[in-house]
């Protein structure tokens, strides 16, 4: 039973990978956090159903505990009643044995007194027949007493067997009750942990989403009035480009202009590697996103490349730049408690040039941000 509920809990986490995988919410884009919020709310009914299922199982286990406890009480009473019956039968058997011994003794003495020859010699046939009749009655009583003793002994054996059987049943029920009570504790623990985990996930996502919204509020959310250039290397894409700024992402209601810094960064990184796909084209493929939302799945890199998320290190960034690849950096703006993705395109040792999907191409990272604000790196690497 415990294993069954652990499996249920595991399936819940596998169904909602953003819960199952340890998330660094500070290292998530606005789009990702918005997706987490919407997906948690969207799937709250499913989670609620899982909790209801566990609650039903808990109620069933409680009923089993109640029934088992009742059966144990009944068995204990029956065993106590059998003990009384066995005691009474023991006494009855003892009494019957004493009576039988007394009757046998009396029968023996009476038999010695009755003699046919004595009756003929004394011409006292009446006394003989009276005594003989009395002796016959005594002998019949002896037989009845013996039969009662045998019946009582048989009943005693049956009652002892029944008591032994019920005691064995009692031992099994007591073990069953202990297991049911253990299962009940485990089920309640799983239910409480699921409620706690789900609520914590939702609270974290809402808190981080609020921080992401602070970024958009601080810098505005308007689309550009004209198409920006491609920057010094021709690879720049702006999420605010009027060609796609108001385009929704996948099947979601989120727009590229509002939450598209991550997919714009992906598009720039892919273009650098010779696989040109615009943010509009990337956003138009629903399979690029989780649960029909703006929550981007791990991208499928161009052939020969892999995707990795790592902690910030200038040596990692420098190695990627030296190899001719961009590095996507997730930035945290402490002064407004906001978050954003940018693309590191050049530089070394912490002094980097970036393409910023919001602020424009060829920016100096340290003029607007700092390397201490880099929360994580996303690499499309060999």
Image (cartoon, rainbow, N blue to C red):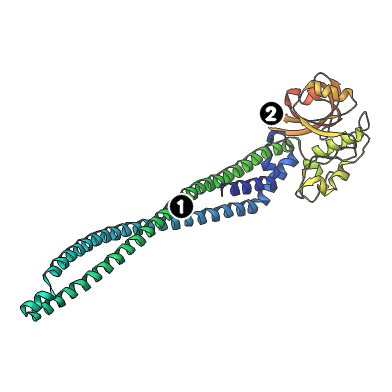
| Element type where label 2 sits in the image | loop
Q: CA distance from mark 1 to mark 2?
A: 66 Å
Of residue 173 and residue 30, the one placed in the foreground of this image is 173
Q: Which mark is residue 79?
A: none
Q: Which quarter of the picture shows residue 139? A: bottom left
- Packing grade of label 2 (10 A; few <14, some 14-19, many >=20) is few
| For residue 226, above or below residue 99 | above
Whole-percent x and y of residue 257?
81, 42
Q: Which quarter of the picture shows residue 377? A: top right
Q: Does residue 297 appear left or right of residue 277 in this picture?
A: left
| Element type where label 1 sits in the image | helix
Q: Does residue 132 appear left or right of residue 14 in this picture?
A: left
Mark 1 and mark 2 lie on one chain; the one further toward the N terminus is 1
Q: Residue furthest top?
A: 349
Whole-percent x and y of residue 172?
46, 52
Quadrant including the C terminus: top right
Whole-percent x and y of residue 16?
69, 46
Q: Which mark is residue 335?
A: 2
Residue placed under numbered mark 1 in the picture: 172
Which residue is depicted at the point 57% across and 54% down? Answer: 52
Nearest-to-viewer mark from 1 and 2: 1
Which residue is depicted at the point 65% across and 45% down? Answer: 10
């Amino acid at each position: 039973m415990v294993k069954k509920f652990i499996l249920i809990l595991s399936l819940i986490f596998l169904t909602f990978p953003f819960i199952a995988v340890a998330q660094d919410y500070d290292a998530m884009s606005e789009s990702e956090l918005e997706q987490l919020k919407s997906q948690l709310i969207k799937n709250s009914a499913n989670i609620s159903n899982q909790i209801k299922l566990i609650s039903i199982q808990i109620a069933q286990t409680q009923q089993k505990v109640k029934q088992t406890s009742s059966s144990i009480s009944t068995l204990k009473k029956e065993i106590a009643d059998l003990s009384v019956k066995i005691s009474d039968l023991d006494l009855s058997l003892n009494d019957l044995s004493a009576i039988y011994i007394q009757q046998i003794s009396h029968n023996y003495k009476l038999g010695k007194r009755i003699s046919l020859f004595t009756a003929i010699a004394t011409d006292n046939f009446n006394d003989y027949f009276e005594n003989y009749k009395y002796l016959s009655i005594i002998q019949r009583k002896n037989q009845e007493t013996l039969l009662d003793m045998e019946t009582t002994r048989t009943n005693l054996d049956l009652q002892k067997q029944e008591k032994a059987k019920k005691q064995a049943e009692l031992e099994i029920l007591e073990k069953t009750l202990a297991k049911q009570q253990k299962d009940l504790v485990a089920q309640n623990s799983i239910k409480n942990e699921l409620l706690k985990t789900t609520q914590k996930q939702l609270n974290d996502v809402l808190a981080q989403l609020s921080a992401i919204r602070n970024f958009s509020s601080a810098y505005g959310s308007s689309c550009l009035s004209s198409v920006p250039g491609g920057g010094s290397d021709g690879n720049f894409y702006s999420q605010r480009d009027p060609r796609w700024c108001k385009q929704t992402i996948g099947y979601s209601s989120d727009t590229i202009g509002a939450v598209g810094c991550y997919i714009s960064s992906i598009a720039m990184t892919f273009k650098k590697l010779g696989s040109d796909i615009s943010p509009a084209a990337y956003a138009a493929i629903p399979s690029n996103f989780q649960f029909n939302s703006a929550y981007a799945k791990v991208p499928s890199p161009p052939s020969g490349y892999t995707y990795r998320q790592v902690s910030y290190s200038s040596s990692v960034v420098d190695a990627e730049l030296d190899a001719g690849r961009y590095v996507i950096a997730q930035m945290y703006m402490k002064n407004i408690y906001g978050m954003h993705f940018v693309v590191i395109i050049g530089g070394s040792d912490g002094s980097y040039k970036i393409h910023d999907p919001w602020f424009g191409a060829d920016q100096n990272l340290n003029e607007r941000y700092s390397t201490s604000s880099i929360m994580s790196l996303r690499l499309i690497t060999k």
